[in-house]
Image (spheres, rainbow, N blue to C red):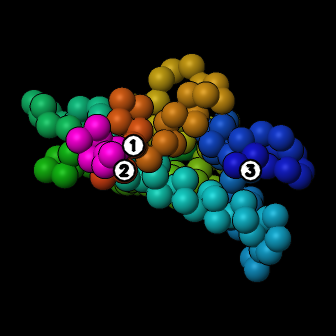
Amino acid sequence: MRIDFGKHKDEIVEFVMLEDPSYIKWVLDQKNASGKLGELQSEIMRLMDIFDRKPILSRCTGHNCNRNATRAAVSRFNPVPSWWCDQCSPAQDSNEDKPKIVCTYRDALNYAARHTGRWESDYQNLIQALARAKGLRSRIDKDEAQEFFCPFPPENRFPDRLMIRWEDLIF
């Protein structure tokens, strides 16, 4: 979906979600949205669901742990995440305040809003770090953003139940 109004007119939503998450937070904060803004909110919610369902591919940073991470931990005033599995505790590695757990796109938006001074770069850095841990390549362009938010992996864009197989055709 292309945004057809405002600051990001003619941009695709997937790209804006990765490049300008502070704008996404602003859109989501608009109460009783209708029309184009309401449609944009619905699309953002759909894409957030896809984002959140993607597993974190990074390894846990716990001491002598080799499991896959399931969450990120960020410290107050430092939006650079460390990656943790469910068995390890981010508090074991922290000399600062108790780390905040970030698992979802909305968690990242809320963390940036509450703890980092609300700089656009803080939103962007945290969302992009989480997206990279979920498989986003380092260079973000519009095609990469669309591929990242595709609900099916690129090698299997269409689930088997939707594929037409030769043997299923009736002549």
Label 3 crowd bin: few (<14), some (14–19), many (20+), radius 10 Å: some
- Is residue 116 or residue 141 the one in the foreground? 141
Residues at marks 3 and 2 touching, judged by CB atoms closer than 8 Å: no
CA separation in Å, label 2 and label 1? 6 Å
Residues at marks 2 and 1 touching, judged by CB atoms closer than 8 Å: yes
**What is the x, y in percent for residue 169?**
31, 45
> Which residues are the magenta region?
164-171
The vertical placement of 113 against 2, above or below, is: below
Q: Earlier in the sequence, mark 3 or mark 2?
A: 3
Q: Which residue in the structure is indicated by mark 1?
A: 158
User: Does the magenta stretch mainly form a helix, a strand or a loop?
Assistant: loop
Residue type highlighted by circle 1: Phe
Q: The residue tagged with tag 1: helix, strand or loop?
A: loop
In the rendered image, residue 90 lying in the magenta stretch gets the answer no
Label 2 crowd bin: few (<14), some (14–19), many (20+), radius 10 Å: few
Q: Residue furthest right?
A: 6
Which mark lies nearer to you, 1 or 3? 1
Residue type highlighted by circle 3: Tyr
Q: Which residue in the structure is indicated by mark 3?
A: 23
